[in-house]
Amino acid sequence: MALYSTITNEITFYTGLSPTEFFTILTIMVFVYRTVSAMFVSREDYNKPPVVSLNTNLRFDDPKPTCEPVQLGEITEPELRPYNGSDPSKPILMAIKGQIYDVSTARNFYGPGSPYARFTGKECSRALALLSFKPEDINGNLEDLDESDLAVLEDWEYKFMEKYPKVGQLVPEKRIQQNEQKEQIQHNFNHDEGKEESNYKIH
């Protein structure tokens, strides 16, 4: 009995409520808590401990398995354009100062509908240097940029070098055509040499 009196006195002292008022409020709070909890958890599962499957993937990044970047070597700007994220089977690429980077791991920034999607599949050095989204600035022309613009571009370049793999290099179309012509000439030369050797053996 003394214990009960002590408890009721403590309740009144700390809460300013009578024991009846205190336990009534406590009962209402428990009822409200149970009601709100039942809105999110089924009654059958309410008292069950949480179960975590061993196969549960707890990663918060993109669950898709990442593939090794495909090295493209030297390509032209027209050959770079299809790598703009519109084809899910191809990586997302963009070029800075002629160097091509695979930004596929950052689809939330560079994938279709994302903030920087207009830069993908293109050489975008000028736009990054000027912090511009204008279509006419999405190119590699750096001729009229001042030192502060070039410093901004350099900062972008360092970020890309640190975060994304380099997979190729942009070259002018004329250079590709010249290389193809050289290869064709070499092929014709080797073919002619083979004919002469055959004729020499016949005689």
Image (cartoon, rainbow, N blue to C red):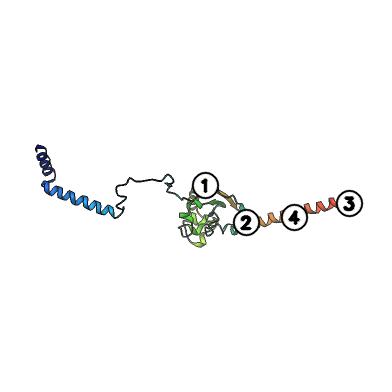
Callout in the foreground (2, 3): 3
Residue located beneath label 1 in the image: 161
Would residue 16 be visible to someone looking at this image? Answer: no
Within 10 Å of disc 1 (Cα), the crowding (few <14, some 14-19, many 20+) is: some
Q: CA distance from mark 2 to mark 3?
A: 46 Å
Callout in the foreground (2, 4): 4
Going by the numbered disc 3, the residue's amino acid type is Ile
**SS at mark 3 in the image:** helix
Q: Position of residue 84 (x, y in %)?
A: 53, 58
Callout in the foreground (4, 3): 3
Q: For the N terminus, give its image quadrant.
A: top left
Q: CA distance from mark 1 to mark 2?
A: 22 Å
Within 10 Å of disc 3 (Cα), the crowding (few <14, some 14-19, many 20+) is: few
Tell me which label, 4 or 3, sits earlier in the chain: 4
**SS at mark 2 in the image:** loop
Residue located beneath label 4 in the image: 185
Residue 191 vertical placement versus 2 (above, below): below
How many marks the image carries: the answer is 4
Residue located beneath label 3 in the image: 202
Residue located beneath label 2 in the image: 172
Callout in the foreground (1, 2): 1
